[in-house]
Image (cartoon, rainbow, N blue to C red):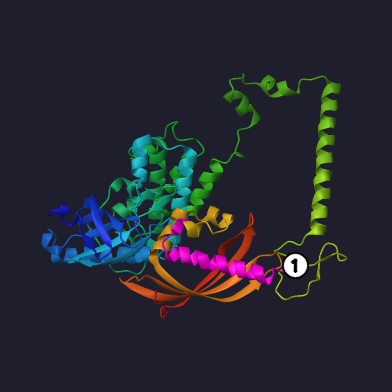
Amino acid sequence: MLTNPQAFIGQTIGNRYTIKELIGQGGMGYVYLARDRMSGHACAVKMFLPQKTSERSADTYQRFLERFKREYNIVDAANHPHIIQVYSRGEYQGVAYFAMEYFPAGSLDARIEKYSQIPPREACLYIRQAAEALDYIHARGVIHRDIKPQNMLIDKLGNLILADFGVAHIAGSSLTLTDQPGTKIYKSPQAKLDLSPDTRDDIFSLGIVLYEMLTGNEPHLRHIHSMGPEVPAAIQPIILKATADRREDRYPSARAMARDLEKALSPRQRPNTLQTHQARGQPRGPSAVKKPLQRGKQGGNLFSFLRLAIVLLVACTLLGAFSLLQRATVHPSAVIFSFPASTAVSSTTTPSLTVTPNPPSASQQQAATAVVQQYYLDWNKQQYQAAYSLLQATYQQQYPLATLMPSYQHTHYACITITHTDPQADNSIQVQVTDNAVEDAATGGTVVSLYHIVYTVKQEQHSWKIAPLSLQRINTAGICNP
């Protein structure tokens, strides 16, 4: 059915993607590892099988083609760190294609295959990240319908990325598809009966995935209803609720399931004293519980008194320090400075005290604008690591480089203008930027989008660092001539 899938290897499609090797294939197309000539990075290219090589009817083929195009549109419209990013789409020699992120670490399925069982805390992380992605698409009227480990990719930082929206359902869409790909063991009873799609069908599949991660077993429902010790007792009710036969008995959202899972693994959920002693092999009974308290009466009272005195002393010290801190500082969420504003700001806790802000100087404002300009200069030169190094540490913790990389590569060039700087009383500086960005268009090719962006710039370890504060896309009628 697939005729000569090696034919594209070595060719450059769309004047951008050089095909390196075939890494996957299915009933309707191929997936290749490619090199993006624009960025120099690896990517994956999904190519749709031409109709002349397909054994399906013309009507069925057309429905598959529409789904292929819609898959790109769904992912292109998504902006979430745990959903795969696409770069561009088009046609090459009559073959529809789109380019997307490539994950050399492979899928969650490969990880289960390698390690057999995923530790509960690691499994909890994957479920939380998948739940965030699912709640994001569910809120936008999209149901994935093919949740399984093969469609959950792992990036180089160990984060889960949801992929393959080829059979996704969009609320209100009349596009239907029979003979759906994928294995039925992840599908809810309602999905197996081809009933109207529901977000809780994805939650059912997520429960199956959780069971498979913890056990390494092929997830049949008869196994789930008789879980063994490899699934912690606190997690078993979560899997049973997620995979309930009736939709109304399942979790209302993926995040609700993830929250219960996090609570089940929380260190605060410890067994009671009796259970703790039993776990340590001590005999069950009153003596096991009372043993730590069997001291002399006076010694026990003295110990309790000393412990109470120490606790009170520490508490008083902390309260005193907190009180001093309150009088010496103003919480940024309580008082917002604007420049130039009055230099005297009264504290709500001590009316007699004033705080005199020391706004950044003109030279510091110039340094702040220079680092913003350098950020875009590195971006335009595709020196993404250098650009990333100019971001504030807290922003980097929230968004690793791998998360931002698709956005970097999606934008080919940015023509910016610094329109305003606004010094803040905390010695940071807000820098307003007009950005005309040449970026990939959803329909293929590029578009110049006009953005208004505000950065907050401050010093960290004697260097100026930036973080986006707000971003607004004005229109797609920008002008940029690199």
The residue closer to the viewer here, 363 or 345, is 363
Identify whether 453 is placed above or below 24: below
Membership of 376 in magenta stretch: yes
Image: magenta residue range: 359-385
The residue closer to the viewer here, 197 or 369, is 369
Residue 206 position within the rendered picture, expressed as x and y whole percent measured from the top left: 40, 49
Is residue 81 something that shows in the picture? Answer: no
The residue closer to the viewer here, 2 or 470, is 470
Quarter of the figure with residue 308: top right
x 70%, y 74%: residue: 339
Is residue 80 something that shows in the picture? Answer: yes
Residue 126 position within the rendered picture, expressed as x and y whole percent measured from the top left: 45, 47
Q: Residue furthest right?
A: 352
x 52%, y 38%: residue: 234
x 46%, y 37%: residue: 119
Residue occupied by mark 1:
358
Per the image, label 1 sits on a secondary structure element best described as: loop
Q: Residue furthest front?
A: 363
Left or right for 458, reference 64: right
> Which amino acid lies under the numbered mark 1 shown in the image of this protein?
Asn
Identify whether 163 is placed above or below 361: above
Q: Residues within 10 Å of mark 1 (few under 14, many from 20)?
A: few
Residue 187 position within the rendered picture, expressed as x and y whole percent measured from the top left: 33, 50
Residue 325 position within the rendered picture, expressed as x and y whole percent measured from the top left: 79, 54
